[in-house]
Amino acid sequence: MDGEQELEEFATRMFDLARAGDTETLRAYVEAGVPANLTNGKGDTLLMLAAYHGHAPTVRMLTELGADPGRPNDRGQTPLAGAVFKKEPEVVKVLLEAGADPKTGNPSAIDTARMFGVEDWLT
């Protein structure tokens, strides 16, 4: 296996940790130097994947270690809009506390909240 394949497999493991909400293992990797804003081929960050899969503790840890709560993926979707879409109010709260802007993204978190009747989550 060449270095590029090894790096790709390592990154895949990091994204799997974020999806699974393995906060402490992922924390150890980020504290050891994995970028908090590591991005996959679709522009999804570790934070986006943790938020989309409903892992508030992982989202909190990543934002505390420097992950950008407002960084959109390649489709213009933000972690906050993803959390609203997946109906994850605790993740929404953590992202708002970390400074995520509900007006950004396509669709924005505000538009997504209106679509699902949960505008009160963003206040």
Image: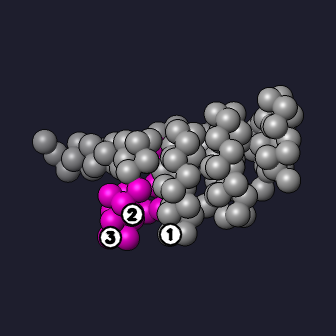
Using a 10 Å C-alpha cutoff, classify the residue at mark 1 as few (fewer than 14 neighbours), some (14 to 19) or many (20 or more).
some
- The x, y position of residue 10, in whole percent, is 28, 49
Secondary structure found at label 3: loop
Secondary structure found at label 2: helix
> Which mark, by number, is residue 32?
3
Q: Which residue is drawn at 52% across and 39% down?
A: 53
Circle 2: residue type: Arg
Residue 99 visible from this viewpoint: yes
Circle 3: residue type: Ala
- The x, y position of residue 64, in whole percent, is 55, 69
Is residue 123 shown left or right of residue 53?
Answer: right
Residue 33 visible from this viewpoint: no
Secondary structure found at label 1: loop
Circle 1: residue type: Leu
Using a 10 Å C-alpha cutoff, classify the residue at mark 2 as few (fewer than 14 neighbours), some (14 to 19) or many (20 or more).
some
Classify residue 43 by image quadrant: top right
